[in-house]
Image (cartoon, rainbow, N blue to C red):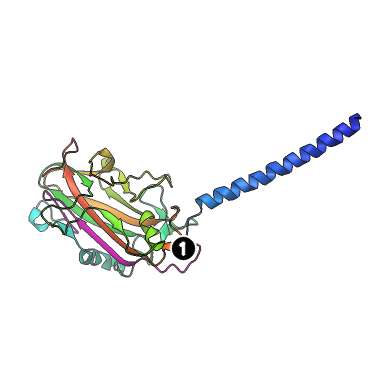
């Protein structure tokens, strides 16, 4: 084989290899796009119907939508939809009118829509933000719990559920709820019900599916005896979650958050 022929063949092989590499690169990009794309593809999101939200506490822990100072008798064991709607009036909305629209966040406090514009809380199409005041009869660390109240069967544990048929019911995997106090030492804690693989840079936790075990992972904030603390919680649909797609539109969503106090060794306070 002449040198000229040898060079020509090598050039052809090189061109084929470059085309193959370019083709594989395109496939890789397409594969990545398919894997990470989750947002709704339409702008006619009809909202989450039958949105029910309840907040309940243990015997040594109480809550209110207002700060009553150390007068613990002014606090209650459960926040109802009616109380939350009273809070939402200043936003000219209510739970049955709110449309949870896909948003995302990297820090749990600032939220944006798919293309980066900022989302405001309790807007027509955004996320829910509510402020509560917690108070305790003794010092404690507050946790979410999945346990059902023994004395009151109506006090079910924390859970996010949907009575909608599949695939609408997959909305329960796209919900996030975070908790932030005025005390920077508490940080921002984010509950991701039915947590799968890590989706965003925001660190999240899930509650155990079996017997409830209290740990620093599901510790939300600290309370001093008879000292109220304002807690802001935000509930949203995570646009980056793989389940946050068109299939879950018009779904039913029920959210229950039940709180319990623990000592510094994560033992429940009775």
Tell me the quarter of the picture where residue 45 sits: bottom left
Q: Position of residue 259 (x, y in %)?
A: 20, 50
In the displayed structure image, the side of residue 171 where residue 260 appears, left or right: left
Query: For the point 86% across and 33% down, which residue is it?
Result: 7
Which quadrant of the figure contains the C terminus?
A: top left
Q: Position of residue 161 (x, y in %)?
A: 31, 58
Residue segment shown in magenta: 41-67
Q: Where is 143 relative to 233, above or below? A: above
Position above or below: 166 against 150? below
Query: What is the quadrant of the N terminus in the image?
Result: top right
Give the secondary structure at mark 1.
Answer: helix
Q: Which residue is mark 1?
A: 246
User: What's the residue at 46%, 63% (across, down)?
Assistant: 246
Q: 16 left or right of 130? A: right
> For residue 177: magenta?
no
**Residue 95 coordinates in the image, percent (x, y):** 29, 66
Tell me the residue at 23%/60% (across/down): 54
Q: Nearer the viewer, residue 89 or 97?
A: 97
Q: Nearer the viewer, residue 211 or 70?
A: 211
Q: Total marks drawn?
A: 1
Q: Residues within 10 Å of mark 1 (few under 14, many from 20)?
A: some
Would you say residue 63 sits in the magenta stretch? yes
């Amino acid at each position: 084989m002449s040198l000229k022929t040898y060079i020509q063949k090598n050039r052809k092989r090189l061109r084929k290899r470059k085309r193959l590499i370019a083709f594989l690169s395109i496939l890789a990009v397409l594969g990545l796009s398919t894997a990470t794309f989750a947002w709704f593809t339409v702008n006619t999101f009809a909202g989450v119907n039958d949105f029910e939200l309840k907040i309940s506490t243990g015997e040594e822990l109480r809550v209110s939508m207002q700060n009553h100072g150390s007068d613990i008798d002014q606090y209650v064991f459960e926040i109802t939809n009616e109380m939350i709607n009273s809070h939402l009036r200043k936003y000219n909305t209510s739970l049955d009118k709110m449309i949870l629209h896909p948003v995302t966040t990297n820090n749990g406090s600032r939220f944006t829509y798919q293309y980066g514009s900022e989302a405001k809380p309790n807007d027509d199409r955004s996320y829910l933000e509510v402020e509560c005041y917690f108070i305790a009869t003794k010092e404690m660390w507050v946790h979410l719990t999945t346990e059902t109240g023994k004395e009151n069967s109506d006090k079910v544990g924390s859970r996010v559920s949907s009575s909608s048929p599949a695939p609408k019911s997959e909305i329960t995997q796209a919900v996030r709820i975070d908790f932030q106090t005025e005390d920077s030492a508490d940080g921002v804690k984010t509950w991701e019900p039915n947590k799968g693989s890590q989706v965003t840079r925001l660190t999240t936790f899930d509650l155990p599916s079996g017997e409830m075990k209290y740990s620093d992972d599901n510790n939300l904030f600290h309370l001093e005896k008879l000292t109220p603390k304002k807690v802001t919680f935000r509930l949203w649909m995570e646009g980056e979650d793989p389940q946050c797609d068109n299939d879950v539109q018009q779904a039913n969503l029920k959210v229950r958050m039940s709180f319990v106090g623990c000592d510094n060794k994560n033992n429940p306070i009775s």
